[in-house]
Amino acid sequence: MKKVLITGGAGFIGSNLCEYFLRKNYQVICLDNFATGHKKNIEQFLRYDNFTFIEGDIRNYEDCEKAVIGVDYVLHQAALGSVPRSIKDPLTSNEVNVNGFLNMLQASKEAGVKRFVYAASSSTYGDSESLPKVEDKIGKPLSPYAITKYVNELYAEIFSKTYGIETIGLRYFNVFGRKQDPNGAYAAVIPKFVMQFMKHESPVINGDGNYSRDFTYIDNVIQMNELAMLSENPKAVNTVFNTAYGDRTTLNQLVTILRKELSFFDSEIAKVEIVHGPNRAGDIPHSLASIEKAKEILGYNPQYSLQQGLKEAVKWYWENLK
């Protein structure tokens, strides 16, 4: 039974990865400090014989050392997300996303971990205006968060070249789906809008709504993590891959689809007005991923478009949060 460590395993993406690999009979270790994750996301896993939970912080090297004992693979999801959060508090974002990342990388190297797959970010493309985004063409970062995620890639590359540990970065593009937290000041746009619609409150779009994103359903992200973890293609290691669907949607289009999907559950939602506010500092105007590299090298084949993913996500939110 292979042993996989999922850092940030009580968070949105991490808990979905825990569930997937538990069902595939991996020995799963979850490391989390509940800074942004939730105990409710992993409660159901505690009855599994092949699940171990470690409450710890990646900023504490001893916690990292404890978590990687006997581990074959690390799926490193632990981070402080959110561009606005990093602008408000760059020090903590750096402590978690850079120091914590380096702790995990060093501990993994020392423990002889076979492969270290980590959550990178589309924010690394920064001020590059070229579309679609191709892995080897990036611009200058537009936020402290973007800097931290780019530094992760630099450290991963140096560790692979210097120490021989296999590293793969997955540049996530606007991931959404079940278990994504709709609450808090830094909630992602989809769950936040869903909750506002369900309360008959007007969602606030930053700017004119023509900014576009490559929204990516959680099951596509799970597929990419598994492919990255297990790929035997030598071209797959010590590099980065866009993790996306490969299509872009404006915020205006997104909110229209959400309102329509939610109206099937509550017809009054169709009448909720949309409000526009100012643009947000540090935001990239347009984001669209090329997924050709992932298709060619990893055999990636995303199964969920935005529309298909939203149907699943809206249903989950309605059943679990209404």
Image (tube, rainbow, N blue to C red):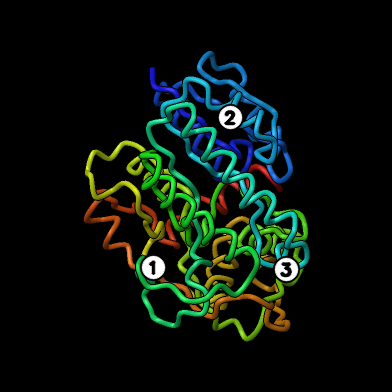
State which tag comes first along the sequence, 3 or 2: 2
Q: Is residue 69 left or right of residue 116?
A: right
Considering only vertical position in the picture, is 307 above or below 238?
below
CB contact under 8 Å: marks 1 and 2: no
Q: Is residue 156 above or below residue 192?
A: above
Q: Amino acid at mark 1?
A: Ala
Which secondary structure lies at badge 2? Answer: strand
Residue appearing at x 56%, y 78% in the figure: 252
Asked which quadrant contains residue 9, the reply is top right
Residue placed at 41% from the left, 52% from the top? 157
**Between residues 240 and 243, which one lies in front from this camera angle?**
240
Decide which of 242, 190 is in the foreground and name it: 242
Q: Earlier in the sequence, mark 1 or mark 2?
A: 2
Relative image position of residue 264 (x, y in whole percent):
57, 59
Which residue is the site of mark 2? Answer: 30
Which quarter of the figure is the N terminus placed in? top left
Eye-nearest disc, 3 or 2: 3
| Relative height, residue 24 to residue 32 (above, below) | above
Task: Give the CA separation, mark 3 to mark 1.
Answer: 25 Å
Image mark count: 3
Q: Which mark is residue 289?
A: 1
Task: Give coordinates of residue 216: x percent, y percent.
Answer: 46, 58
Nearer to us in this view, 155 or 80: 155
Q: Which residue is mark 3?
A: 87
Question: Please, is residue 153 above or below residue 143 in the view?
Answer: above
Q: Report whether residue 266 is seen.
A: no
Q: For mark 1, does the 10 Å Cα neighbourhood hold few (<14), some (14 to 19), or many (20 or more) residues?
A: many
Q: Amino acid at mark 3?
A: Ile
In which image quadrant can residue 133 be found? bottom left
